[in-house]
Image: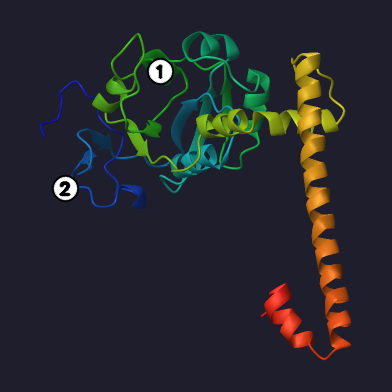
Amino acid sequence: MNRNSSLPTPTSSCSISPTLKGSKIGDNASSVILPAFDFEINQPPVGRPIRVYCDGIYDSFHFGHAKALEQAKKAFPNVYLLVGVCNDQETHTRKGRTIMKDIERYESVRHCKWVDEVIEAAPWVVTQEFMVYHKIDYVAHDAEPYQSTESGDIYAFVKSQGKFLPTKRTDGISTSDLITRIVRDYDLFLMRNLQRGMSAKELNISYLKERQIRTQYHLEKLNVSVTCQLNVWKSESHVLIKAFASLFGVESFVAKYIIGEV
């Protein structure tokens, strides 16, 4: 791959970190080419912390988010990790409603041990001016093109400058998955909160819906209670039958062929 002459001159050609193992590096290389990707990654600067930037919504902050930030933090031996979190206005306009408010999302990310600094109300699209202002060396994100109205891939220009660090998504966990679980078990979560003292008004449900949920809950409890009692009676009846059969010396016969015990 030919280097783009417009790319900035990297500050160092030091050996690459373990995160970028397997890349082709020459003795005087200023960037590396990862075999799995079609973009180059500049060698990291030396003599100071490497400023890596991650951005996102981070709604219902979960271990998938944390593992992505961990990858960015551990990309090089000395990383200062900045994390941009988009505010509610930007997020609700572009992607839809969030579970957590932006202030809650800022605090959730701030309390992740991999994070050194949270940039509140981060821009939806990273710009050159933003990167210069925050002295960002690399932007870390999964490598799939991220679409927006401004660009086919909002990280395209970052990749073209050799400043993009690909991270890997964690399978089996996402904010969408968590929301799906709640929607799937909607009535169970409604009953959970009703039991904890929340009102129908607080849960934004009608009085009839509340009655329906409570009735369903009590019927399920009654069903469990009746089933347990029937099992108790069945067990006690077996004891009585075997005791009666023992008077005639046919206890084993009754137990095996009448009651069905092995």
Q: At 46% across and 17% down in the image, what residue appears?
A: 133
Amino acid, disc 2: Gly
Q: Which residue is mark 1?
A: 126
**Secondary element at tag 2:** loop
Q: Which residue is mark 2?
A: 26
Q: Seen from this angle, which residue lies furthest front? A: 248
The Cα atoms of the two marked residues, 2 and 1, are separated by 31 Å
**Secondary element at tag 1:** loop
Q: Nearer the viewer, residue 65 or 210?
A: 210
Q: At 26% across and 42% down in the image, what residue appears?
A: 13
Res 41 → quadrant:
top left
Left or right of residue 239, residue 152 in this image: left
Mark 2 surroundings within 10 Å by alpha-carbon count, few (fewer than 14), some (14 through 19), many (20 or more): few
Q: Quadrant of the N terminus?
A: top left
Residue 201 in view (yes/no): no
Relative image position of residue 77 (x, y in whole percent): 44, 49
Res 180 → quadrant:
top right
Sequence-first tag of 2 and 1:
2
In the picture shown, does residue 94 fall above or below 39?
A: above
In the picture shown, does residue 161 fall above or below 242?
A: above
Relative image position of residue 259 (x, y in whole percent): 73, 73
Relative image position of residue 158 (x, y in whole percent): 31, 24
Mark 1 surroundings within 10 Å by alpha-carbon count, few (fewer than 14), some (14 through 19), many (20 or more): some
Res 99 → quadrant:
top right
